[in-house]
Amino acid sequence: MRSVLFFRDFRKFTGGHLKVWDYFNHVRHSAGYRPHVCFSERSIWNESNPWFSIQQGPDDSRGSVQPDVFFLGGRNWRLLDRSGHDRPTTPKINLVAHVRHADPDNPRTAYLTRKAVRICVSEEVRQAVVDTGRANGPIYLIPNAIDLTDLPPATAHAGKPTDLLIAALKEPRLGRELAQRLEAMGQRCELLTALLPRSEFLARLNDARVTVFLPHRTEGFYLPALEGMALDTLVVCPDCVGNRSFCRPGYNCLRPDYTLDSVLDAAIAALAIAPAERKQMLGQARTTAAEHTLTRERAAFLAILDNLPRIW
């Protein structure tokens, strides 16, 4: 069994940590590899940390593994450099989860020159990385996926108790402005601006007829919109670059420009959409979610892992 070493700086639960946890589990399901994880000293250790459920503490693998492969995400290059584990000949897989990796003003861009097999989570991220001309090593596209078995059974649209949910954890001020505008027009809405336990967040999505998602202005993918599609809430998600490949306006969601007025207009339109059109859009949204399964993501990743010596 060959070893794959992951690095994490876990200070709160995020979608990025969830996706690395998915890849950690992909390795656990492989025939020839065993995953290990090394946490930063600042990492928290409680039930919000997915690894809490499978090992005794955050230090289980620190300094004890001489890995055959490194798995790096985000700024994990810094943790690798500090760990003392690095060997230039050891293959490195770099999960590129955001278009900001291609921004010349972002420190992540400098890591593109370090040799790695790069996996991009969306076509938008892949193209941004290619366009820099700086990536050292092959670049693969594996679209982000969700664990459909991790979601609650979808409540039928007609039985959902909440008319409109605004998921504004990443843009709370905009969320409050949007809620005020809607309420002034006589629309009832629920506003989320604080991090909730994952199960509660998914339950809120499941309860809503319409959900307005407010991601960062730029994202690498944005998984919550895909989760909303799987849970039969009509998705309104403004253009954040990384959602263009799966948020298809008029087909499975509404994808307005990222301005307050445009998002407001889209929210009102979603509430007023004709039943036949809404039914068709929700069905197409479920199909989109079903195309982004962990099974597909795992198969694509393990094909790379199994051929890594040749690729590297």
Image (cartoon, rainbow, N blue to C red):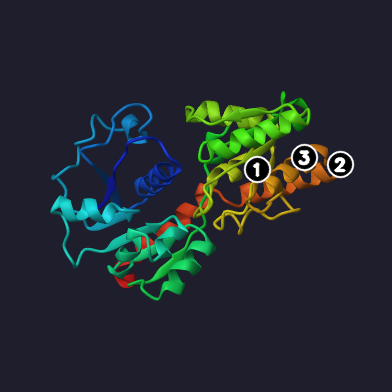
Q: Which residue is drawn at 13% across and 45% down?
A: 63
First along the sequence among labels 1 and 3 = 1
Badge nearest the viewer, 1 or 2 = 2
Vertical relation: 219 (above or below) 198: below
Characterize the local packing of mark 1: few (<14), some (14-19) or many (20 or more) Cα atoms within 10 angstroms: many
Residue 268 seen in render? yes
Residue 37 relative to residue 172: left or right: left
First along the sequence among labels 2 and 3 = 3
Q: What element carries label 3?
A: helix
Vertical relation: 76 (above or below) 274: below
Nearer-the-camera pick, 28 or 214: 214
Q: Is mark 2 on a helix, strand or loop?
A: loop
Which disc number belongs to residue 229?
1
Q: Where is residue 132 in the image (x, y as percent from the top left)?
A: 42, 72
Nearer-the-camera pick, 112 or 159: 112
Residue type at the position of mark 3: Ile
Q: What is the distance, in whole Å, between disc 2 and disc 3 at their CAs?
A: 12 Å
Asked if marks 2 and 3 touch (Cβ < 8 Å), the reply is no
Asked if marks 1 and 3 touch (Cβ < 8 Å), the reply is no
Badge nearest the viewer, 1 or 3 = 3
